[in-house]
Amino acid sequence: MSSPTVTAVVLAGGKSKPDLLAATGVSNRALLQVEGETMLARVVRALQESGVAGQILVVGDVEAPEGCLVLPDSGDFVENVLQAAASVAEEQYILYATADVPFLSSQAVADFVTRGVQSGADMCYPIIPLELCRQRFPNMPRTALSLREGTFTGGNLLLIRAGTVRKQAGLLRRAFAARKSLWAMAQILGMGIILRAVLARLISPRLLSIAHIKSRVQQLMGATAQEIVTEYAEIGVDIDRVEHVQNLRESGYRVGSA
């Protein structure tokens, strides 16, 4: 059976915070170099070599990588997500990737997309066992959640049908605006799932499961969802803070501007 082909979107509009700019001299995180190559170029290469990406759109005020179409940065993360979906047919899948995952591999992309498309779900998201991240990238901090099935961290890919993106534009805007407020996020997720998360942390991880989270995501999105448990730890390593840059340098990587 031939590999599925999806529209790939690289979100490259992230501006460096002042401390990261001072430490690296790079105003756009996507253009930070790791091992002599920008993170954007590394992500684009992984997509191109995966065999599952057709058209590749880059959203950001950057020079177009070879073989890619560039859309301007709107200055708003959600609007960038939406503009990339505007011309894609309803049922077609879009693979979103952030431009700050320098270790993303073509194998990781192909595995995630193939398994996601095979699931038939409207939206697929990667979760990675935390222990695998610690083994592969021991110095990189990760936010993790302990669940009945184990302790997992999230990844920087999302596979979703274009129609689902457009249908849930309002929810995406609300969620992004609420991302730094526990109370605002609780209003979106519902106190039930928040209470389970608190009790799971305080009493036992068995009180919160993947199924609980998936059920709530499906209710909110009005679409089917599927987690993809992946062993490709590189999906979860994003570089967006000074701490990350310092950890990479301490691990022997060359990180900085051109």
Image: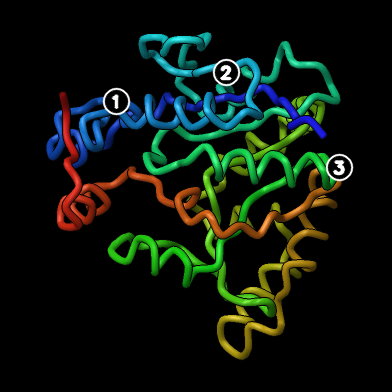
Report the amino acid beneath label 3: Gly
Report the amino acid beneath label 1: Leu
Q: Is residue 61 above or below residue 220?
A: above
Q: CA distance from mark 3 to mark 1?
A: 35 Å
Label whose residue precedes the other's in the sequence (3 or 1): 1
Residue 162: image quadrant is top right
User: Badge 2: few (under 14), some or many (20 or more) residues near its Cα, within 10 Å?
Assistant: many
- The answer to whether any part of residue 71 appears in the image is no
Residue 203: x and y in percent read 61, 90
User: Badge 3: few (under 14), some or many (20 or more) residues near its Cα, within 10 Å?
Assistant: few
Residue at x 42% of width, y 24% of height: 13
Q: CA distance from mark 2 to mark 1?
A: 17 Å
Residue at x 58% of width, y 22% of height: 79
Residue 211: image quadrant is bottom right
Q: Which residue is mark 1?
A: 31
Residue 184: x and y in percent read 60, 53
Q: Which mark is residue 56?
A: 2
Q: Secondary structure at mark 1?
A: helix
